[in-house]
Amino acid sequence: MLKQFLPKEHFKSVLDISPQALKARGIKGIITDLDNTLVEWDRPSATPQLVKWFEEIKRNNILVTIVSNNNEERVKAFADPLGIPFIYQARKPLVRAFKQALLQMGIKKEEAVVIGDQLLTDVLGGNRSGFHTILVVPVAQTDGLATKFNRFVERRIMNWFRKKGMLQWED
Ligand SMILES: [Mg+2]
């Protein structure tokens, strides 16, 4: 049952995910979380490095949809300047928003990856919906209030994975 929380891949940062490598694997779309995945949960807009990464993604003809559990104001203010479509109040790990993102991008599940920093929302939701899931280390060590309890549960799941040798972080 805990396998549902296991990501297919993990990276230190989204910036370490190579757009060329995704393209080479036949990936046509990215469904990504926002808070603590792309930037710190309390940073309003993208960093210059992230803007460059998105440009590289675009150059490789890969679509992006931001799927966030956060509110419209936060997600829109971040996504609009980048010209990236978004779904707010996504209620991850429920599958509805993931399916909606796929539909909007007009691609198949096999052509998409789900990226996020949380096992209980991003990875669980992505796995449940049958996506290739990629976990990244949270950009900030702190979290919004809603995430704090999730992190507590997540640490226990992570420890279990580590013990089983299923997940190795560098740090
Ligand atoms: Mg997050």
Image (cartoon, rainbow, N blue to C red):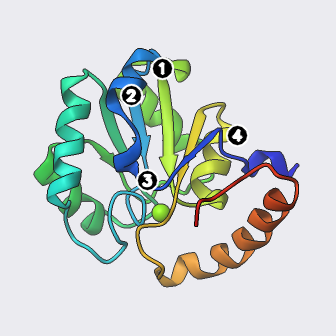
Q: Which residue is mark 2?
A: 29
How far from the left and from the top, in percent, is residue 106?
38, 19
- If the image is split into quadrants, where does the C terminus sit? bottom right
Image label count? 4
Question: To which residue does mark 4 refer?
Answer: 128
The residue to which callout 3 is attached is: 33
Coordinates of residue 38 in the picture (x, y in percent):
35, 57
Residue 137: image location, x then y, percent: 51, 61
Q: Can you identify the residue that label 1 sits on?
A: 111
Gap between marks 3 and 4 measured at Cα: 16 Å
Towards the viewer: 47 or 165? 165
What SS does tag 4 mark?
Answer: helix
Which comes before the other along the chain, label 1 or label 3? Answer: 3
Amino acid tagged 3: Asp
The numbered dot on residue 142 is none
Residue 27 vertical placement versus 118 (above, below): above
Q: Amino acid at mark 1?
A: Glu
Q: Mark 2 vs mark 4: which is more N-terminal?
A: 2
Q: Secondary structure at mark 3?
A: loop
- Residue at 14% across, 57% down: 48
Residue at x 22% of width, y 71% of height: 44
Looking at marks 3 and 4 on the same chain, the residue that comes earlier in the sequence is marked by: 3
Mark 1 and mark 4: Cα distance apart in space = 16 Å
99 and 139: which is toward the camera: 139
Crowd tier of the residue under label 2, counting other residues whose Cα lies within 10 Å: few below 14, some 14–19, many 20 or above:
many
Residue type highlighted by circle 2: Gly
CB of mark 3 near ligand 1 (< 8 Å): yes
Measured as percent of width and height from the top left, residue 14 is found at 39, 49
